[in-house]
């Protein structure tokens, strides 16, 4: 890899570190190519990404970034899982670590906050952005549907009474 390629990788990693809601660092020693493809596919489905980069280049890219605190985690065979959603990458990494013993989560960063492995696990248990939006919409829609039901109830009660009177008159 020549100097221009290294500079491009550092720039890409810098963008990842700046724009990601969460970055999870893990060791992947012993994973096969098929295992890594599986991890990448899971990440893609969840709206996050996986990146393997040289630790030295990643450390250079981290200089001056909000998540600079993860520099100490970058040793050995490391892989970065990241996403804009502050929960998605942590969920994917934790689920994959449970399914594969060779994938060991070291920690990560959420903005300026450094996370250890337990912190990544705690973040992975939080509801995702989509789940939060769905629950907020449910909370907003519930009163409206209750009002609509209350407004429609007298009409259905009157229809029921008229139906009963009609049945009695016919009998």
Image: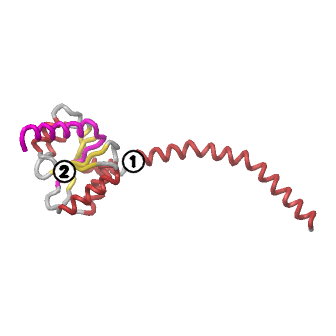
Total marks in image: 2
Q: Left or right of 158: which side holds 36? A: left
Dot 1, crowdedness within 10 Å: few (<14), some or many (≥20)? some
Q: Secondary structure at mark 2?
A: strand
Q: Residue furthest top?
A: 64
Q: Is residue 160 magenta?
A: no
What stretch of residues is rendered in magenta? 1-27
Assign the N terminus to one quadrant of the image: top left
Q: Which residue is mark 1?
A: 128
Q: Position of residue 59 (x, y in %)?
A: 13, 39
Q: Nearer the viewer, residue 39 or 161?
A: 39
Who's the residue at 89% across and 59% down the image? 165
Q: Nearer the viewer, mark 2 or mark 1?
A: 2
Of the numbered discs 2 and 1, the one sitting upstream in the chain is: 2
Q: Which residue is mark 2?
A: 79
Above or below: residue 98 compared with residue 90: below
Q: Which mark is residue 98?
A: none
């Amino acid at each position: 890899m020549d100097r221009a390629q290294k500079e491009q990788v550092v720039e890409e990693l810098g963008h990842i570190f700046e724009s990601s809601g969460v970055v999870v660092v893990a060791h992947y020693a012993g994973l096969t190519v098929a295992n890594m493809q599986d991890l990448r596919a899971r990440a893609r489905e969840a709206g996050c990404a996986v990146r393997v980069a040289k630790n030295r280049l990643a450390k250079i890219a981290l200089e001056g970034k909000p998540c600079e605190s993860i520099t100490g985690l970058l040793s050995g065979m490391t892989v970065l899982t990241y996403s804009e959603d502050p929960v998605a990458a942590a969920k994917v990494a934790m689920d994959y670590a449970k399914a594969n013993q060779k994938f060991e989560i070291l920690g990560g960063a959420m903005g300026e906050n450094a996370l250890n492995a337990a912190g990544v696990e705690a973040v992975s248990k939080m509801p995702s952005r989509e789940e939060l939006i769905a629950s907020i919409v449910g909370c907003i829609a519930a009163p409206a549907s209750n009002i609509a039901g209350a407004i429609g109830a007298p009409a259905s009660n009157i229809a029921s009474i008229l139906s009963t009177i009609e049945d009695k008159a016919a009998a």
